[in-house]
Structures are given as C-alpha cells and as structure tokens.
Amino acid sequence: MTARIVLLVAGLVAATAAHAEIRYTMTHLGYVSNFQATSPADINASGQVAGWSKTTRPSPTEPGYFVDHAFLYKSGVIQDLGSLGGESVGLGINDKGHVVGGSEIPLLPGASGDADWRAFVYRDGVMTTLGTLGGQNSEARAINSAGDVTGYSDTAASVTTLERHAFLYSNGSMVDLGTLGGTISYGTALNDVGQVVGVSSVSSPGFLSHAFVYTNGVMTDLGSLAGPMGGSSASDINNAGQIVGASQFGSGPQSHAFLYDQGAMIDLGTLGGSDSRAAGINALGQIVGSSLVAGDTRHSAFIYDAGAMADLNDLVDPNTGWLLTSANAINDSGWIVASGYSNGRYAGFLLAPVPEPATYALMLAGLGVIGAVVRRRCSGAIDSVSSVSSGTGSVR
C-alpha cells in the first residue's frame, strides 16, 4: 500500500510539472453591435478591459461610416460607454475601473470638417473631458491607481504650426511635459510612482523620435538600439521602472521590441520575422506584444518571459479558428488582452493562464492529504513515512 501511495504522489508531482507549461484559455469579449469589430487596449487587476468597438451609429461627419465607441468589459459583459458627441476609444483602465481615452466632441453650429478630439475619463457612469493644453485636440492614453492620467494635447501654438505635447493630468490640472527638443511628444503610459513614458521628436534634423521617461519633472531620452540616429518609442512601464517599447535596431526601418532596465536597452528579438513591438509589461517582468513570424507572412501575439519569446497562438486551443495578432496588455496575474482575426471579423480576447495559482494550491493540498493517509496506514513505520513526507515537501 505504501509503495502504491508513493507512486501516486510521484504521479501527481509529475502531472504538476507537466502542466506548469503556461497555456491560456480564451474568452471572447463580444461586440457592442452587430458589426463584429472590437479592439481591446488595456486590462486591470480584476480582469476588467477597456477598448473600442464598432457601433451602428452613423458618423456625424463622415457619410457611410459607423463610429467606434469606447467600451468597458467586466463580469462577462461588454458595455458601450458612449461618447462626448461622435466617435470614442477607450485606451486605459485602472484598478478602480476608471477608463480613459479620446472622443470627438460636437461641431459648432454651422461648422464643417473634422470634429475636435478630447481626452476623457469615464467613472461612475459619466464621461468627462479633461480639456487641452490650449489647442484643439487631446487624447488620454493611460491612468494609474491614483487617477493620474497621461496622453497628448495640442498646445496653443498649434494654431499656426503642429505642436503636440505629452501631458500629466493630476488633481484637476493638465501639465505640459515638454519634448526632447522637437515639437511633438506623446505620453503613452504611467506607473503608480508617477513616472510617464512615451515618445518625443528630438532636435536632430528630420523626423527622428525617441522613447522617453519623465521622472520628477525631467524628461530623459532613452536612445535606441541603433544609437542616437535610430528611432524608438516606449509603450509601457511597471512600478519597478522597467520600460518596454519598440526601437530600430539597424540601418533599416524595422524595429525590435525592447526592455529598458537599469539604464540599458535590451533587444528582445522576434518570432522569426523582421519586426516586433512590445506593448505591455507587468510586475513580474512578463512582456507582451506583436511580432512578425518567419518569412514575415503574418503578425502574431507574443509573450516574453524568462528570457524567451513565445507565440501565444501556440499556447491556446488550436481549434478556436482565431489568429491572435497582437497582445496589448498584461496584468500582474498574467492575464492578457489580445486582438484576434478570423474571416473578416476582428475581436478582443481575455487570455487566462492555466493552471492558475489556485490549481497549484489544490494539487499541493492533495499531496498533504495523501501524506496523512500514509501516516495512518503506516503508523508502525514512522521513519519511512517521514522520508516520503520530506520528499513531497522538497518538491513543493
């Protein structure tokens, strides 16, 4: 009997190890209308998702076009958040479920042409504009746990020349973060420490842009994998200050995903193709994004973990009929929001790791129960049972 139980313990341990290879379940986020087009952008700690989805509402400025609306996905339901007057997109969400993004505002009576765009925050059922830095347009890209927001806004000078700056919105005030020397910058993400990352044009000739991090009032140029004359952009930052994005890595236009950590920019490579871009990073340092595959035949969503990049399409059920083209964000539990394509349909998906931590706990609890059975069955062989228990403990 003891031998059989020991073999069962060994089998459970082996099964645990076999299932430790991270795989994911896929949950379809749905659509806000019969138009099957949804794009997820961000995810919070609770698995709530922000993004945008095609509606049946005609555009007030573009005949024949139907507008997108920002959405909030929670508790298995996708909710249309409406807009400030026309189209809207949700781009960021914090752990309180507050959503930020951009929305068209109504044209003035008698006016024609494109509508202006405004940064917004959606909370408690109300969408509120955050204003601008004096220009006509703004957009919010991210919000942290304190409710601070970053994005971009046209400045007052944009009336005569294109001048668009990253901003930090905090305590009801929008602060201009400036640039790296050029006229354009965008804030793309911020952490709970208040550090902002993004991309800015530099003072060099041409249209060169570099990734930046803004900390304590100072915007720092992160450079590029190709040196000072290569382009780069930052897309996310975690609370440890690790930054991800994309950078040129040679003389060509192709970019590689990067991790910027402790003053060094690290090339994360690709899934075999010529181009990759990192979109999000969590507290564990897990990175998600999109990469061309070998032969540059298509884009695939990826996760980069423990020094290796894996195609997420290889880690989900191959019979779903969907191609995951990009992974857009990842939370600290390892849940991922990704974009997928299938037969002319575009959808958002929530990917959850399997087995989840609770599953491991259940397996380990099972080992404890078996240990108790061994002790009862073999009360006359305490030393032997102790050795089995120690072996199980060491596996844990």
Image (cartoon, rainbow, N blue to C red):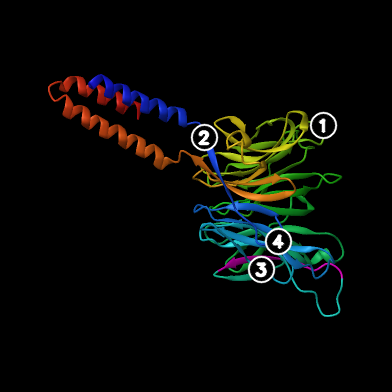
Residue at figure coordinates x 53%, y 58% from the top left = 74
Q: Amino acid at mark 1?
A: Ser
Name the residue tied to disc 3.
82
Is residue 373 visible in the rendered structure shown here? yes
Against 261, is 111 above or below?
Answer: below
The span from disc 2 to disc 1 (Cα, nearest Å) is 36 Å
The span from disc 2 to disc 3 (Cα, nearest Å) is 37 Å
Q: Amino acid at mark 3?
A: Gly
Tell us which disc is closer to us: 2 or 4.
2
Q: Does the stretch in magenta take in 337?
A: no
First reached walking from the N terminus: tag 1 or tag 4? 4
First reached walking from the N terminus: tag 3 or tag 4? 3
- The crowd level at tag 2 (other Cα within 10 Å; few <14, some 14-19, many 20+) is some
- Residue 22's disc is 2
- The crowd level at tag 4 (other Cα within 10 Å; few <14, some 14-19, many 20+) is many
Q: Name the secondary structure under disc 3.
A: loop
Name the residue tied to disc 4.
139
How far across and down, in percent of the image, does residue 218 sit? Answer: 65, 51
Name the residue tied to disc 1.
251
Q: Which residues are magenta?
A: 113-123
Against 117, is 234 above or below?
Answer: above
Residue 145 shown left or right of residue 217 in the figure? left
